[in-house]
Image: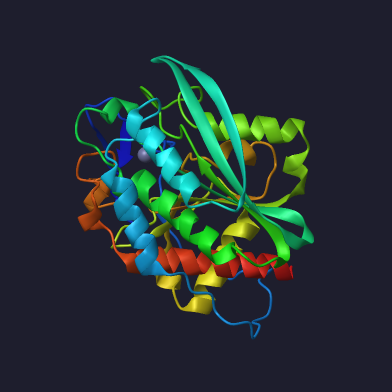
Amino acid sequence: MWLLCLFGTVALVSCSRGTDAQPKAFFESQPLTRTTPPTPPEAPAPDSAPLPHIDAKRAFQYTREVTAFGPRYMGSENHKKLEHYILDHLKGDQVEDDAFIADTVEGKFPVRNIIAKFPGTKDGIIAILGHYDTNYPLRNIGYVGANDGGSSTAILLEYANQLRGKKRDGYSVWLIWTDGEEAVRKWSDTDSLYGARHLAEKWEKDGTLKKIKALMVMDMIGDADLDIDRNTIGTPWLLDLIYAAAERLGYQSHFYAREGPIEDDHLPFVKRGVPSADVIDLDYGYNNVFHHTAQDTMDKLSPKSLEIVGDTILETIHMLDQR
Ligand SMILES: [Zn+2]
């Protein structure tokens, strides 16, 4: 398994770790590098709309509760409990399931994407994805995925709170808790992104993909030391729009210090031409040392980081509505 060890102008060093657990895959040939902040040509002029604010304390509490379930790998009891936890928080919302059986190198697993739809006045969909599963290969090491799986589940629950109860004056927003993002053995095209691949295929067939104006994935967004990477697997104008939203909120120093390709749940949608961006901080602890280890725990996270990402993406949605 490959993790990048150093970035920037310093020579790149790669390090291998003797475990079957796989990260979001990097392409070894295209390391993350330091960037100069983009000047988005397509960013709309500043408007006078009020700045969005999520309830970061509540989002942090969700992260704590999700993490407290323990390991939540596909097929586990804890996974079932978390499904019910998510659904309990979506009572009264328009909820859909995308459930199927994945045939993997470790056997068959039930996979369940949970979709909550919040209708808007404008024709088109903004899709926000975040995975809620933890890694099957890490099931016996006390791995709880506070940041990787926990933060993404929680931020979507908080978005649901923000969207609920009013018809949006803009695009419809769909929140998707994806399942089976993690590999069951070793990250590859066929062993990863089970839920997202299934959903992308389904939405291609039923015509939904054509209606998606923008798709954004939230992943590992709770690190107290927040550095969102510019994931170059993605749509440049959307990446720039997210940066412009962060700038409007004064959060730009937490975005795009590094850039490089990272495979994540957005990949099957990128491949099908959907405007997509992955909002991820893959620098979790020095040299990403906490990623996919038993050290991925609540004490590394901060409500402020959830607030930075939460508010920035809500502002991005607002900017998308204006386009
Ligand atoms: Zn992971």
Is 310 in front, or is 26? 310
Q: Quadrant of the N terminus?
A: top left
Colour basis: rainbow
In the picture, residue 143 is in which quadrant?
top left
The residue drawn where x is 57% and y is 70% is: 315
Rendered image quadrant of residue 182: top left
The residue most toward the front is 92
At 68% from the left and 45% from the top, the residue drawn is 274
In the foreground, 243 or 118: 118
Quadrant of res 305? bottom left
Question: Does the image show residue 179?
Answer: yes
Ligand 1 appears in which quadrant? top left
The answer to whether residue 202 is left or right of residue 278 is right
| Image: 248 above or below 144 | below
Residue 255: % across, % down: 44, 64
How many tags in the picture?
0
Q: Quadrant where the C terminus lies?
A: bottom right
For residue 242, side relative to residue 72 (left or right): right
322 to 79, vertically: above or below: below
From the top left corner, tell me how far across and down residue 277 is, in percent: 56, 51
Q: Where does residue 97 sit, x and y in percent of width and height?
A: 59, 36
Q: Position of residue 44 (x, y in %)?
A: 69, 74
Work out whether residue 89 or residue 20 is closer to the camera in this orientation and state it.
89
Q: Is residue 56 left or right of residue 195?
A: left
Q: Residue at x 51, y 75 (%)?
A: 247
Q: Nearer the viewer, residue 165 or 170?
A: 165
Outermost residue, bottom side: 48
Is residue 38 in view? Answer: no
